[in-house]
Image: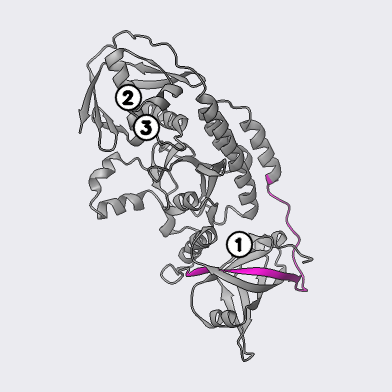
């Protein structure tokens, strides 16, 4: 092909609907509008299969088609010659198109009509430019490759996981003009992602959870693929919808221990990128905007590369943190004031400080082990290595993300203004600071 498919990806954003021309076995032509043309790789595209209509019948009988596309910026017109290969009704390509279609449907008032049945995969045989006038390509707003380089240079300076996560979100704002973002780590054993860092929101949402497979974030984690939506979609909204669903299903009592996920009231654009290391998903870098079509294919390329660098850095730092030896045990002076009641519920490891909910799950189990050692043995110094060997905590065997859980726990304690704090004292070491006496109560 004289024209490369990746050079006309602007035409595939759906700004201007495409047309598909097919022919029946008796030679009758048919032309129809397309909801989506999805870039798969430099030789393949996927078209949305929503209805069993004339186009569908034609393509199953004669697997060749012509697709007409227009660049929404320059108005350049292209014609693609395609060969139908197969239909996928699950997997990364299908989920990407399903999420995008939900946004398109919501944007056009067709939520009850636009439902993806499958992703039709086509080989691109040829691309031709249709003669006609086109506008000049406007100057780029931002050099994304330069932005990626600046981010990489800033991130490589950090040897602490907490600082690395914070620096990543700062770099996104500074170099990519992305003001609302969060990082979630994957708890594969529990089938959830939990928020460890965020930027641009009134509340950090540290500890907020999203089930794998739920919304843009959960689907991106399940499929291990980046997913972005260019228009608001109620189907992929978070926060209030999750809580209302729990209430409808008779789980209202659990809302007390659900930390609200931070987020824009109506995100017009959403983008979730898997953070991967050693061929497995560690977490998700999630970004959103109040602007329609904020993230394009070029943004996707740069931010997927950034998430790859972040994944490698997280993995190296977590391995390094585990190598430090345990510090010496020290006995603190008795804290002043009345005792604070600390309740631990064994069923889900949820922890309350007084009447306030703190955390649950593995992070709750870690906190309970720490305060028990403090009350029973006077310990304040701990190491990551010994926590990994502590059978009380029940860390997952694979990808325990201990360091991320400690960051989450420390941030929750700070945000709540708790009488217990976790302070890092060295590589793989930390200290418990307790300002009030603690009364521990185990609830079965």
Contact, mark 1 vs mark 3 (Cβ under 8 Å): no
Find residue 439 and report its image quarter.
top left
Q: Quadrant of the N terminus?
A: bottom right
According to the picture, the residue beneath numbered tag 2 turns out to be 369
Can you tell which of label 1 and label 3 is closer to the viewer?
3
Q: Position of residue 208 (x, y in %)?
A: 39, 40
* Mark closest to the chain's N terminus, 1 or 3: 1
The disc at residue 13 is 1
What residue is drawn where x is 64% and y is 46%?
302
Label 2 Cα neighbours within 10 Å, binned few <14 / some 14-19 / many ≥20: some
Label 3 Cα neighbours within 10 Å, binned few <14 / some 14-19 / many ≥20: many
Q: Position of residue 337 (x, y in %)?
A: 25, 13
* Mark 2 and mark 1: Cα distance apart in space: 51 Å
In the depicted structure, whether residue 331 falls above or below residue 24:
above
Nearer to us in this view, 223 or 37: 223
Can you tell which of label 3 and label 2 is closer to the viewer?
2
The disc at residue 363 is 3
Asked if the magenta segment contains residue 238, the reply would be no
Q: Quadrant of the C terminus?
A: top left
In the depicted structure, whether residue 88 falls above or below residue 389:
below
- Magenta stretch bounds: 117-144
């Amino acid at each position: 092909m004289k024209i490369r498919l990746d050079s006309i990806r602007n035409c595939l954003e759906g700004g201007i609907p495409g047309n598909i021309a097919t022919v029946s076995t008796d030679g009758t032509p048919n032309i129809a509008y397309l909801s989506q043309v999805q870039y798969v790789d430099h030789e393949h595209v996927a078209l949305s299969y929503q209805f069993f209509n004339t186009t569908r019948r034609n393509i199953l009988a004669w697997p060749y088609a012509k697709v007409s596309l227009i660049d929404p910026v320059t108005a350049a017109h292209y014609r693609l010659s395609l060969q139908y290969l197969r239909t996928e009704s699950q997997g990364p390509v299908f989920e990407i198109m399903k999420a995008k279609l939900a946004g398109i449907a919501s944007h056009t008032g067709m939520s009850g009509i636009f439902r993806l049945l499958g992703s039709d995969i086509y080989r691109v045989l040829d691309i031709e430019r249709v003669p006609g006038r086109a506008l000049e390509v406007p100057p780029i707003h931002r050099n994304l490759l330069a932005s990626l380089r600046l981010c990489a240079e800033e991130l490589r300076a950090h040897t602490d996981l907490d600082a690395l996560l914070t620096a990543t979100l700062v770099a996104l704002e500074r170099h990519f003009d992305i003001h609302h973002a969060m990082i979630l780590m994957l708890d594969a054993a529990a089938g959830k992602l939990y928020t460890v860092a965020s930027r641009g929101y009134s509340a950090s949402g540290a500890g907020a959870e999203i089930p794998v497979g739920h919304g843009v974030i959960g689907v991106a984690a399940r499929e291990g693929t980046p997913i972005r939506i260019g228009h608001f979609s109620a189907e992929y909204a978070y926060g209030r919808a999750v809580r209302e669903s729990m209430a409808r299903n008779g789980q209202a009592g659990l809302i007390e221990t659900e930390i609200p996920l931070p987020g824009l009231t109506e995100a017009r654009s959403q983008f979730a990128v898997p953070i991967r290391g050693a061929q497995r998903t560690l977490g998700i870098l999630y970004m959103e905007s109040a602007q329609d079509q904020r993230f394009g294919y070029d943004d996707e390329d740069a931010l997927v590369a950034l998430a790859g660098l972040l994944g490698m850095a997280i993995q190296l730092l977590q391995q390094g943190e585990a190598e430090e030896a345990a510090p010496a045990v020290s006995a603190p002076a008795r804290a002043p004031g009345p005792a604070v009641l600390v309740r631990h519920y064994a069923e889900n490891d949820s922890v309350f400080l007084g009447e306030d909910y703190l955390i649950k799950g593995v992070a709750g189990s870690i906190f309970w082990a720490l305060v028990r050692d403090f009350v029973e043995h006077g310990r304040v110094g701990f190491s990551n290595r010994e926590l990994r060997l502590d059978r009380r905590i029940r860390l997952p065997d694979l990808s325990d993300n201990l360091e991320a859980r400690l960051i989450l726990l420390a941030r929750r304690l700070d945000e709540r203004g708790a009488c217990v704090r976790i302070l890092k004292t060295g590589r793989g070491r930390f200290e418990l600071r307790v300002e009030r006496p603690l009364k521990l109560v185990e609830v079965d």
